[in-house]
Image (cartoon, grey):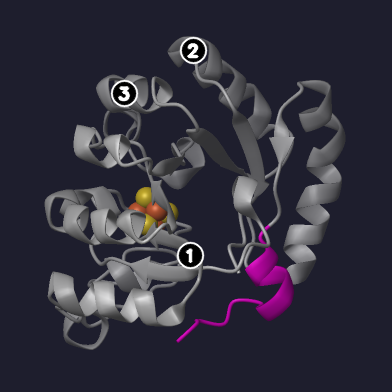
Amino acid sequence: MQGEGPSTGRSCSFLRLGGCNLTCTWCDTPYTWDWTGSSESGVAHRPADELHPMTVEEVTERLTAFGTDLVVVSGGEPLSQQTRLLPVVEAMREAGVDVEIETNGTVVPAPELAAVGVRFNVSPKLAHSGVAESRRLVPGPLAAFNALSGTCFKFVCSGPDDLTEVEQLVRAYGLENIWIMPRGQSPEEIAEGLRALADPVGARRWNLTGRLHVTLWGNQRGV
Ligand code: SF4
């Protein structure tokens, strides 16, 4: 199931790519990039265990075999590998499959990806990520995503106090289609976050999303 954002609840296949250009302290997928234990988890993951190089053909075949009408590409930061990702995305689109790419919004998307009708779910990071502003907020990519139809901007918030920071970014970059998602890796944290955020998000006429996969399966990794 896609667990977050506008397609929440849709059956999908996931393609998770390794490596990230940011180092968010609370990252929920540190196994894609944290080889030293610098994130909150404190675990130094082993690239040899986590990264599995595959050809474009292998990836395309495996995604096709799942038979879903939606593929979600996530990471890490998948656009760091967008040149190699493009033929996979093109093959899925040719087969009539919807494709969403989840990105931290710091890499300009290749025009070819937009041309085949990919939807970008962009998640710019707030100050509580622990990442320097100059790395997590890059005007060029944010403007490029904002200009693409269908893009949604999804902000991970610890609580209503974070909405002021989101408001500043929305104004500064002219962002549209705003989604707010509570930070949390347990069903209880997500439920509590949704309750705290619902009214102030609604008052701003933004959208609210939970994390359906966390509600259903907690912090368990998929296979
Ligand atoms: S951008 Fe995403 S994948 Fe990268 S460190 Fe931050 S939360 Fe993790």
- Amino acid under disc 1: Asp
Q: Is residue 83 above or below residue 218?
A: above
Q: Quadrant of residue 214?
A: bottom right
Magenta region, residue range: 211-223
Q: Residues within 10 Å of mark 3 (few under 14, many from 20)?
A: some
Taking the spot 29% from the left edge, 27% from the top edge, the residue there is: 141
Label 2 element class: loop
Taking the spot 63% from the left edge, 45% from the top edge, the residue there is: 6
- Amino acid under disc 3: Ala
Q: Residue furthest front?
A: 95
Q: Residues within 10 Å of mark 1 (few under 14, many from 20)?
A: some
Q: Earlier in the sequence, mark 3 or mark 2?
A: 3
On the image, the x and y values in percent for residue 50 come to: 26, 81
Label 3 element class: helix
Respond yes or no on whether mark 1 lies under 8 Å from ligand 1. yes
* Residue assigned mark 2: 174
